[in-house]
Image (cartoon, coloured by chain):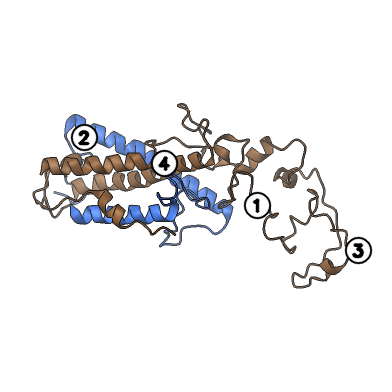
Chain colours: A brown, B blue
């Protein structure tokens, strides 16, 4: 029984290590994406950044825009001043009533060279970890072992996936440690003195162990 | 042990299908439109609708998770060292 449990755990550990990077708390980046964009602002001002909203250095031109979102008569007027959509100082990007051209030029739904915008995070190649949120206050960007050096966006996302998965499992485990030792369990009775790290090896039931990767293979999605 | 492992397998396979490219096509690759950790499991409606609120909750979850990782490592080390429960005996249900 003991060897069966150990083989089962070994297969689970091997499958996890092979699937995810064995990094527990590696990825972190700037929390304030807006601040980060302000610090790493594009010097030639070819893109429309958030710093333009903050310092108001470039006052938007006041166009006679029609505020009715259902009225598209402005776009049929050839004398409309809004003829160049690539002007970064244009208020077209800031106007909530304006039509976003397929969503590609909208600052909330744009796609950078590195990847699409996901939940407000656009991959920014000038900031550490591509501006992925997670650098919390007392330490900031904390990566002393250099796990995120020389990684692409996919690598950083894999690291973050591994971190958040281990974090969720650890949040459950921290509760389960304290609950299991101090509450009645089915296997050990009402008043037991089994500590949490011995609970699997001291299980009285001889039930079946099953390698985890077998059912993972059976649940694999079909190839499209 | 079998139901426990089956439950873990179910959750892990669901997460892998949601976020990862099938291994026949490419190994060790996340989907391009997958935000790490955003698997769409939100039964209590805690996820904010705005992007700023999502970033705030994401950072909160990350900091709780980092603290919990350190805490579980400390609990395991402490129990391996002295073989006693973390909390004193009958802490919750009483004597």
The disc, 3 or 1, on the residue closer to the chain's N-terminal end is 3
Q: Given the image, what chain letter belongs to the residue carrying mark 1?
A: A
**Which percent across, then down, holds residue A164?**
42, 45
Badge 3 density bin: few <14, some 14–19, many ≥20, Cα 10 Å? few
Chain bearing tag 2 is B
Mark 2 on the same chain as mark 4: no
Q: Same chain for marks 2 and 1? A: no
Callout 4–callout 3 Cβ contact below 8 Å = no
* Image quadrant where one finds the N terminus of chain A: top left
Judged from this view, the residue extending furthest toward the top is A144
**Residue toward you, A178 or B29:** B29
Residue A199, by quadrant, is top left
Determine whether label 3 and label 1 are within 8 Å by CB. no
Q: Which quarter of the picture shows residue A159?
A: top left
- Left or right? Give the position of B88 relative to A78: left
Q: Residue A166, how many percent across, how many down?
A: 37, 43
| In front: label 2 or label 4 | 4
Q: Mark 2 — residue?
A: B79
Mark 2–mark 4 Cα distance, whole angstroms, equals 24 Å
Ranked by sequence position, the earlier of labels 4 and 1 is: 1
Mark seen at residue A79: 3
Q: State the mark number for residue A163.
A: 4
Residue under numbered circle 1 = A110
Q: Nearer the viewer, mark 2 or mark 3?
A: 3
Would residue A75 be found to the left or right of residue A170 on screen? right
Image mark count: 4
Chain letter for the residue marked with disc 4 in the picture:
A
Q: Residue drawn 41% across and 52% down?
A: B22
Residue at the right extreme, as displayed:
A79
Label 3 to label 1, Cα distance in Å?
A: 28 Å
């Amino acid at each position: 029984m003991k060897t069966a449990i150990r083989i089962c755990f070994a297969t689970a550990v091997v499958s996890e290590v092979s699937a995810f990077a064995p990094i527990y708390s590696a990825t972190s980046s700037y929390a304030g994406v807006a601040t980060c964009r302000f610090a790493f602002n594009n010097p030639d001002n070819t893109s429309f950044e958030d710093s333009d909203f903050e310092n108001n250095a470039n006052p938007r031109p006041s166009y006679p825009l029609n505020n009715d979102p259902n009225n598209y008569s402005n776009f049929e007027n050839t004398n409309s001043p809004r003829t160049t959509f690539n002007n970064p100082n244009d208020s077209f990007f800031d106007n909530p009533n304006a039509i976003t051209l397929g969503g590609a030029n909208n600052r909330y739904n744009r796609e950078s060279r590195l990847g699409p915008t996901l939940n407000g995070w656009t991959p920014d190649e000038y900031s550490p970890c591509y501006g992925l949120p997670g650098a919390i206050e007392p330490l900031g960007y904390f990566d002393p072992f250099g796990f995120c050096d020389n990684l692409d966006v996919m690598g950083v996302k894999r690291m973050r996936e591994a971190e958040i998965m281990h974090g969720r499992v650890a949040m459950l485990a921290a509760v389960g440690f304290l609950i299991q030792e101090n509450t009645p369990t089915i296997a050990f009775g009402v008043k037991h003195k089994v500590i949490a790290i011995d609970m699997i090896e001291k299980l009285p039931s001889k039930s079946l162990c099953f390698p985890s990767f077998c059912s993972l293979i059976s649940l694999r999605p079909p190839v499209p | 042990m079998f139901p426990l492992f089956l439950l873990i397998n179910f959750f892990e396979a669901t997460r892998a299908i949601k976020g990862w490219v099938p291994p026949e096509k490419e190994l060790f690759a996340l989907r391009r439109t997958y935000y790490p950790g955003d698997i769409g499991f939100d039964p209590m409606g805690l996820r904010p609708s705005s992007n700023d609120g999502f970033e705030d909750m994401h950072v909160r979850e990350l900091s709780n998770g980092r603290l919990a990782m350190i805490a579980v490592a400390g609990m395991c080390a402490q129990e391996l060292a002295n073989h006693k429960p973390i909390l004193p005996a009958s802490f919750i249900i009483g004597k």
